[in-house]
Image (tube, rainbow, N blue to C red):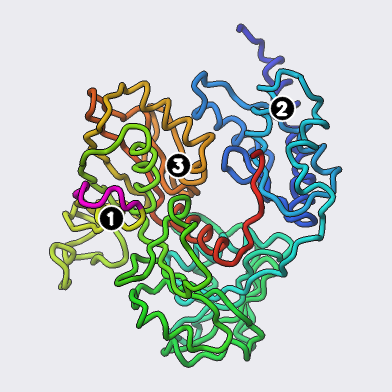
Amino acid sequence: MNQKPDQCLGEWIDREALAETMIPLIGQLYRNNNVVISIYGRSLINRSVIEILKAHRFTRHRQADETELSVHDTFPILKTMSELKLGAASVDLGKMAAKFKDGKGERSIEQFVREELADVIGKQNETPHKGKDVVLYGFGRIGRLLARILVEKTGSGEGLRLRAIVVRKGAENDLAKRASLLRRDSVHGSFYGTIIVDEENNTLNVNGNLIKVIYSNDPSTVDYTAYGIQDALLVDNTGKWRDAEGLSQHLKCPGVDRVVLTAPGKGKLKNVVHGINHGQITAEDKIVSAASCTTNAIVPVLKAVNDKFGIVNGHVETVHSYTNDQNLIDNFHKGNRRGRSAALNMVITETGAATAAAKALPELAGKLTGNAIRVPTPNVSMAILNLNLEKGTSREEMNEYLRYMALYSDLHNQIDFVNSPEVVSTDFVGSRYAGVVDAEATICSDNRVVLYVWYDNEFGYSCQVVRVMEDIAGVNPPAFPR
């Protein structure tokens, strides 16, 4: 279609105006009703006009026909929702709009929204829980990203509430330094909000969340009840203890109810990949592991492929950004090759992800091998899945199936899908998915397939950890559309 300049500008101004109108409705639903609005998994909470329009535009990469979602499609649904006194819920406007369109006008917008959200209509302020206290034990890369996500998801305070951070004191100006690291991040950018430091009371006021910073060298000696914290979910992101014996030290502390480890667990600890085996968490599981970033990235895709085509065997090669465990310049390291400069070298190292995958997905036991290459990038990694299948397929069929799984299956929070020929690693910084299938890179020859899966090994993994936390705490709102 041959458009004129004035027409293009006019349409853009029209979309801008509609997106501006959406912002207060999204905010009110979030703060007053604890309703989280997203578009195909991309949160619209506290987003700007441009970010809202980009979220709509982004959907074209996930559609087979490359069509773009319009704010004219989503705004009427959002407006109707704002008038219904909804209870806590997670609503995907993109999927709601697609479902309404598929109905071909059989229902009005109001009828459609009322029927789809019937379970939560009129249930504002009827949430049966008052929020769950959370303690972060350690405040490194994962700890600070968890803090960002938890603060972002505070809403009306009925979900996970970050109450305390436990660290070893590193300097006299320790609190200011830690606040600065939360405020500014070389990879993920500036914190979206305000941080007020109170050194006299050792607290950080982060977007209204008053967080106590506790200094301790021994995990078993902190009395959290002295800070008003009760039945807390403690997240150990230090990686120092990875078995039940070590992590059980936290359970000796007054005020701690359960523990989540942000690393692969050892021994009999359950390694949980949300979306795969989170349903196996029971009330008796006082300590669980959220597995590793790589395990979280590959297992959902492996499950999807195995369910439809069957996996005979395969090899997982991880191209992984360097981590703080490596040396910045050549120096002694107890691990093989890891003593060489992370910023200058590709470093072959081991990964337990292939073996760990079988803990979350037992049907893959003994079928996968794995290795890893650390590369000189600070974040975002890639898993290359080289698989032999029971059923032959084509590149087109495989990609279309994984696109469908990303959009409509129970794994839609874990698997994302992109078919752009121009994406590179930095395009996935901040991705909230466990892994993103790169359709352009898929190789398929009958029963042999090679899949390329990007993942933000910091932020995407942290989002998976929070999903596990929400399940344990019982603060997961129902998701719509069904």
Q: Residues within 10 Å of mark 3 (few under 14, many from 20)?
A: many
Q: CA distance from mark 3 to mark 1?
A: 17 Å
For the residues marked 1 and 2, what is the alpha-carbon distance in whole angstroms?
A: 42 Å
> Which residue is denoted by mark 1 in the rendering?
353
Label 2 secondary element:
helix
Instruction: Identify which residue is drawn at 40% across, 66% down.
Output: 289
| Relative image position of residue 66 (x, y in whole percent) | 52, 21
User: Is residue 332 depicted above or below 156 in this figure?
Assistant: below
Q: Position of residue 460 (x, y in %)?
A: 45, 52
Please name the amino acid that badge 2 sits on: Asp
Quadrant hosting residue 471: bottom right
Q: Position of residue 394 (x, y in %)?
A: 31, 21
Q: Is residue 286 magenta?
A: no
**Nearest the camera: 326 or 272?**
272
Q: Can you say which quadrant of the picture contains the C terminus?
A: top right
Q: Which residue is mark 2?
A: 73
Which residue in the rendered view is the most extreme toward the top? 2
Depth check, mark 2 against mark 3: the one in front is: 3
Mark positioned earlier in the residue sequence (3 or 1): 1
Whether residue 182 sits left or right of residue 44 in the image: it is: left
Magenta segment range?
Answer: 361-369
Q: Amino acid at mark 1?
A: Ala
Labelled pair 3, 1 in contact (Cβ < 8 Å) = no
Query: Which residue position is annotated with label 3?
Result: 415
Q: Is residue 142 left or right of residue 449?
A: right
